[in-house]
Amino acid sequence: MRAIETQTPGGPAAERALAAEGRAAAEAAASAGDAPASELPLRLLLRFSDAGFEQRFIQHYIAFYLRYAQASLLLGALLVSGDWLIDHLAHGGAAANFLRLSLAVPVLLLGLAYSCLPQSRRHWQPAMASFIVAVALCLFFILVRIDAEGGAGLKTWVGVLNFTFLEFYCFVILGVQFRHALASGLMILAAFLYALFAHAGLSAGEAGYWAYHVLTVFILAAGIGWWREFVLRKEFLARAALDDSLLAAEQRALRLAHYDEVTGLPNRRLLGELAAPALARACAGGPACAVLHLEIDRFGGVHELFGHGQSDVMLAGMAQRLRACLRGNQALGLEWGLGPLGLAAESDRVLARLGDHAFAVFIAELEGQERASGLAQRLLAAVAEPVQVDGQQMLLTASIGIAMCPGDAQDLLNLTRCAEQTARVAAEAGGAQHKFFDEALNARAKDRVLLESELRQALLSDQLRLHYQPKVDARSARLVGAEALLRWQHPQRGLIPPGLFIPLAEDSGLIAPLTDWVLHTACQSLRRWAGQGLTVLPLSVNLPASSLADAGLPEQLSGLVQHYGLQPAWLMLELTETMVMRDMATAVAVLDRLRQLGFGLSLDDFGTGYSSLSHLKRLPMSELKIDRAFITDVARGGRDAALASAIITLGRELGLQVVAEGVETQEQAEFLIGRGCSLQQGYWFARPLPPEQFEAVLRAGTCRL
Ligand code: C2E
Ligand code: MG
Ligand code: MG
């Protein structure tokens, strides 16, 4: 029990369940103990209504009493022999003594021998009862002989006591089942009464007197035997109820340890047990196996939206679908249902639940990759069917990673790891697809996972840096502002550009603390520059995609600038078109509030998104940054030049300050000046600079030209 409890995957929940079952067991035991008392009648004493239960009762007590019965048989044989010896020595070989020895001892020894046979247990009670009757008859003959020889036989109280003791023994010791004891007791009583009246040579009065005593003792012995059986049964009922509920609790614990509670599917442990034989065969040159790791795409969002309860219902439904989808071909682990755990020794396909929204299908004896691919497609189609949650229809997709044994890995642990990584690669590639394990792809995915955990560390251990790229008036190279750009000073990998870790931070939820850090550091820099008496120019800070969904952003930023004693206009917040377009209504509300508070707003990477003119008109922007993509070929004329010119005109028409980013050459700079866009940012003027170098530029107020 202990071992099972500690193995239980459900942890505290499973233990709670077990504790509850333990309590239930105790209650059941208590009530089981009481139940027979309320229905004491003959039915209980003569037989149980449930034959199976009666069987268990008898087996239990026979197992318990057999040892005592054997001991008393042996003792009986010794006593009879010893008695004979004494009689022989004292009376010189009376015939009755010989009879006793030749009849009673063999009967006793035969009974003993029989009781040692394994099958004796089945006939133990009738055998013992008939044995006692035989002994009684034997004793009866002995006593009669003793009487005939003028000794103290039946005519004396010794003889009567002998018989009485036999009866008593019969009821009390053998009375596991009262009816057997009663039958043998009645036979002995009849023999005894017969002996008293027909053979003892007593007068009718004397015989009646003894018969009265014997009958009294018989009734007493019967009562004791009856009561004893009642107590035995009562105790057994309580014990059996306890055993039953402990067994049920044990089975439940075993089930918890092997099956997932939400979906009822085998868990990772059971999957391992079921897959082991097929994997061993595959590694020994037998048919290949595969693991399909299926993860529902973006399930985190669904979970947040609907909470635990609904998500669990959804997952259980999904499990049913996948199960039905597999059932099309083969049976499933769940339905094999062999053995105490419902474990099948072996199987072709196993569907298991591995994690929050992850399932695995193990395929034994795979005939070819196409089969795995076909199955993956069917599973994807099953997931893609609409789901009803809270009256809403939802469309989910999944990503599947497939790893093969023995090619990709040889044990289930590594096989599931490969499949899981591959599923992640499939999810990153847009989801709703399956992929086979590929070493190179997975190495990259692994690298990302590693980078993510290192990024968490970076936030705590001061590895982030802000570099500042000057924004200039290209006509005079005068500094007009700067953009704060994030860098990660990795202890081993060196300076990592934001393009490599910002998307990762956005996926993993690290973007919020990262943005906090950037905003605080940018504000600290502005404060320091102002404190040093340097001209304070607007500093642009890039905001992540998620920021506009937060209605509290304006107040938060306003608190921040107040905290550092800055003016909101000193901060220019850079947003991309795509961010704004995601939820236009909320975005416009947040942006309006930011403008009211006095923050500068810049539309970054303009031209790469999908914003239409009408949208642009609704946005309360103060600046528009033409994306580098349009600047690169601008000096060569052609399409890019035309587009850049159009954007510049458009920005000016809308009253926005237009900045060209990514200016790398003098030609580009001059072309843009010629088109009326003199505010520029790019390597031609300065690369993003570490704080000390940027402060020098700030002091000079100009960039090289
Ligand atoms: P962005 O906001 O468009 O920033 C301009 C990017 O162009 C910067 O790249 C800058 O170094 C680069 N750049 C500037 N002039 C030139 C040039 O003349 N030639 C070339 N080839 N590149 C130039 P960086 O620093 O790698 O940043 C890339 C992107 O990462 C940024 O694009 C921005 O979207 C994002 N990012 C940077 N810092 C942050 C941050 O603190 N928070 C957020 N959410 N995103 C940031
Ligand atoms: Mg930017
Ligand atoms: Mg940009």
Image (cartoon, helix red, strand yellow):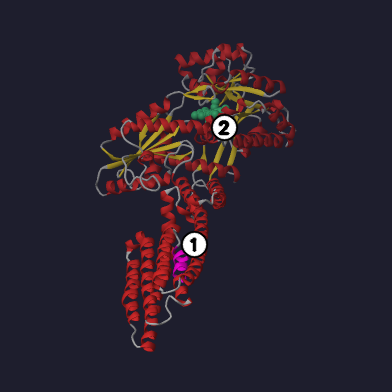
Please identify the quadrant where the C terminus is shown: top right
- Image coords of residue 661 (percent x, y): 55, 24
Q: Is residue 117 above or below residue 481?
A: below
Q: Tell me the amino acid under the disc marked 2.
A: Gly
The answer to whether residue 166 is left or right of residue 391 is left
Q: Nearer the viewer, residue 159 or 299?
A: 159
Checking the image for residue 243, the label placed there is none
Q: Where's residue 46, x and y in %?
A: 46, 53
Q: Is residue 204 above or below residue 553?
A: below
Residue type at mark 1 is: Ala
Magenta region: which residues? 164-174
How many C-alpha atoms fall within 10 Å of the one at disc 1: few (<14), some, or many (≥20)?
Answer: many
Q: How far apart are the two marked residues, 2 and 1, measured between alpha carbons?
A: 68 Å
Report if the CB atoms under discs 2 and 1 are less than 8 Å apart. Answer: no
Q: Which residue is mark 1?
A: 222
Q: Which quadrant of the figure shows ligand 3? A: top right
Residue 307's tag is 2
In the image, is 346 to the left or to the right of 44?
left
**Which of 641 and 376 lies nearest the eye of the viewer?**
376
- 181 to the left or right of 660: left
**Residue 446: image location, x then y, percent:** 44, 41
Q: Nearer the viewer, residue 44 or 561?
A: 44
Viewer-nearest of labels 2 and 1? 1
